[in-house]
Image (spheres, rainbow, N blue to C red):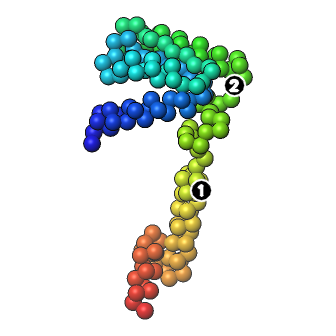
Amino acid sequence: MGIGASMANNMDLVQGYAKRVKFPYMLMYAESDFVVCNKAVKEWHSRTKSTDKTMHEIPNAYHELAKDPNTSHVYGHMMKFMAKRIAAKAGKFGQLVGSKDIKYATKHRWYQRKRFWILLLVIYLLIGGLISIYRKRKNMFLSWPALLILAKRIK
């Protein structure tokens, strides 16, 4: 199934989840968009439960708003929205309070951190260096795990 078919099949889910949207948001859509149905966008916006919601129609624009000639309208609306949120001393942008369904920012697990992989590399090279010094074989410096596995199988 292609991305277009997947989007078409899941539009009812998007409309159904609209009532779960309670966080502040700004919605911009292009007046001459051939990809997105503007009627569906307006319907979704009206169904949300957010108390702080803004919707802007960008005139004479197509689907990719950031690449249209009217980018001054797009970025102007963005800056006004962010300034309003900062002035209201809002929390993080996109923060969902009390929602278990959507997470915008997650903490990296220990194995996803760069520091873990650097430490693992240092340990690997240290063990390889010690084994190559002990056995007086330079070829064991990087290939020591494979040679240890072979040594266990030979015994």
Image quadrant in which the N terminus is located:
top left
- Label 1: state its secondary structure: helix
Left or right: 23 as drawn, with respect to 63: right
Return the disc, 1 or 2, that comes first in the chain's sequence.
2
Decide: is 130 above or below 18.
Answer: below
143 or 109, nearer to the observer: 109
Q: What residue sits 63% from the left and 21% below the top?
A: 51
- Label 2: state its secondary structure: loop
Q: Is residue 118 visible?
A: no
Q: What residue sits 47% from the left and 23% below the top?
A: 44
Label 1 vs label 2, nearer the camera:
2
| Quadrant in which residue 93 is drawn | top right
116 or 40, nearer to the observer: 40
Spatial CA span between label 1 and label 2 = 30 Å
Residue marked by disc 2: 90
Q: What residue sits 53% from the left and 13% below the top?
A: 77
9 or 107, nearer to the observer: 9
Left or right: 67 as drawn, with respect to 91: left
Where residue 20 sits in the image (x, y, percent)?
55, 32
Where residue 23 sits in the image (x, y, percent)?
61, 28
Find residue 110 and name its label: 1
Where residue 146 sits in the image (x, y, percent)?
41, 76
Q: Residue furthest right?
A: 89
Q: What residue sits 45% from the left and 29% below the top?
A: 15
At label 1, the amino acid type is Trp
| Quadrant in which residue 14 is drawn | top left
Q: Is residue 150 visible?
A: yes
Left or right: 86 as drawn, with respect to 73: right
At label 2, the amino acid type is Ala
Q: Are marks 1 and 2 in contact (CB under 8 Å)?
A: no
